[in-house]
Amino acid sequence: MADQNDEESGKAGKKNPPPPSISPMDIGASTSTSASASTSTSTSAEYQLKKYLLLLATLVATVTYAAGLNPPGGSWLEDDTDTSSRHLAGDSILRETNYIRYIVFYCFNAISFAASLVVSLLLLLLHRGDQGWLLKLTRAVMVVDLLSLMGAYAAGGSHDRFTTVCAAGLVGATFACISFVVPCMIFKQDKAATATRSPGDNHEHDHHHEHDHEQSKHEILLVLAIFVATIAYVAGLNPPGGFWRSTEEGHHTAGNPVLQGFHPIRYKFFFFSNTAAFVTSLLAITFTAYEKVDLKAVKVPLCGLIITGILGLAGAYAAGSCRDSKHTGYVLALIVPVLGCIFLQRFLAINLQHHFSFGSGSTGSGERNDLEKPREVIQLLATLAATVAYQAGVDPPGGVWADNREGHIVGDPILLTTHPGRYRVFFYFNSAAFVASLVIMVMLQSERLVRGHALEAAMILDLFGLIGAYAAGSSRDTSTSIYTLAIAGGVLVYVVIHVVFFTLDHHHPGSKKGGGEEAKKEEEDMMEKKREVLLLLAILAATLTYQAGLTPPGGLWENGRRAGFPVLLDKYPRRYKAFFYCNAASFMASVALIVLLLNPTLYGPGIKCYALFVCMVAGMFGLIGAYAAGSSLHLGTSIVDLALVIAVFAIVVYVAIIRHGQQQNKEPPKGEAEGSKNQSSTTTTETTHGQSSDVMMAKYLMLVGILAASVTYLTGLKPPGGLWREDGAGHDAGNPVLYDVDRHRYNAFFYSNSTSFMASITVIALLLSRMILGSKSNKPLWPMHTAMLLDMLALLGAYAAGSARDWCTSKDVALLLFPVLAFVLLLFFWKKGPQPANT
């Protein structure tokens, strides 16, 4: 089924392809454009941009999965047997206070989650020359995905008249812009293209290379817009200050934001800024990914949308992370020293460039390509590992104490009191994974470390740290932790057995015996593309399930002997076990797949015999099963979820069967395939030569900045230690607990986190301005690289201060840098010996 779907374009995947179409107006539209016609009229944009569409589907599925398990408004903390307002602990507050809005949000969110998974699976079946019904189906599902995401945000983030009007107005304006402005722009561009079209091939050839140059920049913008949209979605559904968990007549209603009552102006500014960032990023995604929009013509409007989204996040962070004007001013003022540091280094670089060379060494294009493949994989893995580990460290499993009773302190982790040994195992495994991820991202610019595979080995150590943290933090007894670890072992055993039986047949029909070097290279390219798709899907499932396993749906008991245990475990034990084991199976299978996919010797036979595809599909089934079991405590809603699951996979299986039959009955002509391959190879070589090291450095800096901005934005709005639930002596509801309990620790976390966030968006904004102005390499990027290094150090400081409650433990987190660095360097020197013999 996937033998030919993924390509005679292993090299073509590196060129800058035409963008995909995810706009509602492009369903059923032709895929040939003036910019891409000279490249290939038979290759769809969706096929060429699998990585970016999978990234979009991954992050949308991540946020909708979390929102489905923990819906806006929070959950009830205690049972209420009163006949007037009967509810159970762990049930959604919004379901009782505003049932219609809850149903609208739940349906839109579930549709968006299911559509994201369907897009991921359909992209596995998409072939190079597809222009028919499968391509249209993929586009239609992507449209449904984004429209459902907007609907879920509008329904889940609205709590009063202002937020309802604001969300409905901005979302409606975005939809109207997509429906009317974009088609008008395309019509004008088509008329202009028709009037200026010349029959000469040279003009089309030059125009194609110019399009590739512009598209290289827009790929970065697409990734940035995706991250802005997803973190704004999460923050809009979970505003700073939390939600009221009880109703008091004349004062507040359960499920309403606490910040809305005490600081209404601050809350309105936060909501408007966050919503503006959300809708502008979705609009930017549409402009970037709409294949008929001339990328050069919309460069300035597109960058304007992205900058608006970044400024919206900055304003929302400044308003939501603070409770007084003084601290808000401090946060905004942090931009000044960051800019000063960057421009000072740039001034020194300009003055010293006559004596020193700041450019990167000249590396051959083929050698750089061989390095970029593992570098991209490791960077993506390290980024997402750092994201989930940071969030889990500052918001630990088991929750935090809500009061001072029975020998514990408010804001301290509950597991630290009830299960101290288990908590320490989780904490140090999670911290090791986080620190290792930061070290790997910083050292990715060393070509020697990438070439020697030292960072890949360190990444495997990073993944083992996540496995240990998950096993310790997701359960409360040793036997369950052992069962969880056994799932990962079972996946590895299955893959080995499957591969062993497959390799018994030495004359497997899928093996290629002829063709020489070209056939071997083509097979390697196909294998690499399949590996990329499987890797992204495995990262999707691991990202979703790690945090969900540590903070299960329904919330956690905060008092009594069951403090730290899931509410769902006591109220609906069978439902909780179904959620737990489905979620654990998906996480362990995904991490095991990632480990296998990092080694060519292991993933080659596994992909050829479809063993890794079977594991991936099983992980997807576990993911949707966990969502159906945990997203609602009511049987009727779960039945609807299961029906949606069955329909989704029935469609995917039906499509897979049809595609498999079509591929057996149809074989592409050899001449066409060779021509396409040669054209791809030629275009790839030219594109690679034209792509400077500064562009690669800009992509690296942008992704690292996105990581830091994502995690620091959400944790700044929801700081470690929790928030006060009620007013009390010396504190207000919605204020950070840590600020009143340990102010020095809170200030260390707050300013480190804020410095990291502001440094990230400043560097991102400077990179965007560099794209708009078309700056050349005479202005070096290393000053921004140094600022990003300081950004990583600030992120590490925020984690050390926010994840622990004593300075000795915080010191241990910082000291974890040294064994991780020693491990990487040991691997490097161990593998350094055989390299000269190969060269």
Image: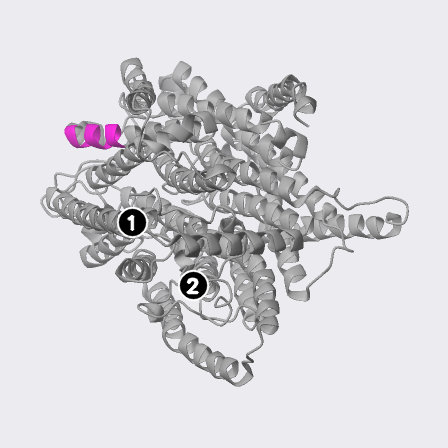
Disc 2 versus disc 1: nearer the observer:
1
Residue segment shown in magenta: 574-582
The kind of secondary structure the magenta stretch mainly shows is helix
Q: Which residue is mark 2?
A: 279
- Between 499 and 793, the one lying in front of the other is 499
In the displayed structure image, the side of residue 828 where residue 271 appears, left or right: left
Q: Is residue 485 left or right of residue 740?
A: left
Residue 578 in magenta stretch: yes
Q: Which type of secondary structure does the marked residue at label 1 adopt?
A: helix
Q: Position of residue 521 (x, y in %)?
A: 50, 40
**Tag 1: residue type?**
Phe
* Residue 599 place in picture, x, y as percent: 47, 27
* Coloration of the structure image: one colour
User: What label does residue 113 carry, if any?
Assistant: 1
Asked if the residue under mark 1 is in contact with the one under mark 2, i.e. CB atoms within 8 Å, the reply is: no
Is residue 779 highlighted in magenta? Answer: no
